[in-house]
Amino acid sequence: MRQLDYNKEIDRICSFIDKYLHKTRFSKVIVGLSGGIDSALTAALCVKTLGSQNVIGIMMPYKNSHPDSLNHAKEVANQLNIHYEIIPISDMVDTYFNTYQVEADQLRRGNRMARERMCILFDLSAKHRALVAGTSNKSEIFVGYCTQYGDSACAFEPIAHLYKTEVKEMSKALKLPESVINKNPTADLWDGQTDEKELGISYKDLDEILHYILDKKLTLEEIQSKGIDKHKIELVISKIKNSEFKRKMPEVIEKVWE
């Protein structure tokens, strides 16, 4: 894996945030605090750059969300000394499904939750004149582990160049709460859901394979020669290909007929 100087990388990200807000003429950001490590790190980096008075945290639990998610989000907000609001999304989500789509499965309901949260963030961004800071990491972006126009929607992405394992190490460097750093990563969209269970691979293995594919430009055979299971490599390659549409702007017809 890559060997990062985390202190230098933190400074580089803070410079990126500062320059982007200066360019867009904003002074505040708003972050959806899920209780997970990605949103915690994003908020911490924004606070380090802009000051706690210019970062707003929004917690949006669903009725089935694990209590720890909200508790950990509060712990992060309190440590960072930022203003936060709690806006439950159960009624908003359930009204749609109970009225129009009773048969919807867990995936559709989870996607709706992610999009409902982003609707709230963008509405409040207008209220507070604050840019929505994205919380996606490189690992999840490249395997499509995100909801299009849900958690993938934002004004800018401070940690999208970091693999999940690097997010964890940087969070340690910033001394974020251990309860957040050491928990099993989960989108908390339904009971018992974990990221690694859904992905079918551990973040350690995923990040190693992604590093060889994206950074080292190695072939399947070259990666396999390093002792990595072929099926895991094929799984990651498949996920990258199948989620490519999520990493692109919508296709358009570039030229008119003449």
Image: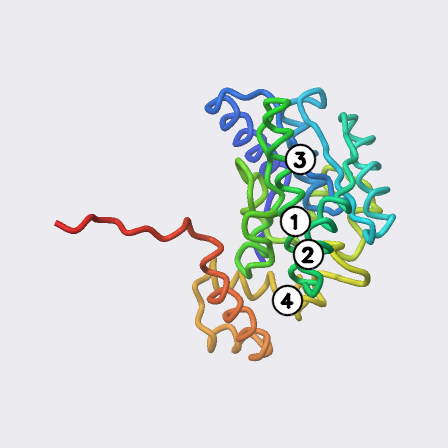
Tell me the mark number nearer the camera, choosing from 4 and 2.
2
Circle 1 sits in a helix, a strand or a loop, which is it? helix
Residue type highlighted by circle 4: Asp
Q: CA distance from mark 2 to mark 1?
A: 6 Å
Reading the image, the residue beneath label 3 is: 31
Whether residue 77 sits left or right of residue 241 in the image: it is right
Q: Quadrant of residue 204?
A: bottom right
Q: Earlier in the sequence, mark 3 or mark 2?
A: 3
Residue type highlighted by circle 1: Ala
Residue type highlighted by circle 3: Val
38 vs 79: above or below: below
Tag 3 near tag 1, CB within 8 Å = no
Circle 3 sits in a helix, a strand or a loop, which is it? strand
Q: Residue at x 76, y 62 (%)?
A: 193
152 vs 50: above or below: below
Q: Quadrant of residue 139?
A: bottom right
Reading the image, the residue beneath label 4 is: 205
Residue type highlighted by circle 2: Gly
Q: Residue at x 59, y 63 (%)?
A: 208
Circle 4 sits in a helix, a strand or a loop, which is it? helix
Which mark is on residue 24? none
Q: Earlier in the sequence, mark 4 or mark 1?
A: 1
Reading the image, the residue beneath label 2 is: 110
Q: Residue at x 73, y 34 (%)?
A: 58
Q: For the residue carrying disc 1, how many other residues have a C-alpha within 10 Å: few (<14), some (14-19), or many (20+)?
A: many
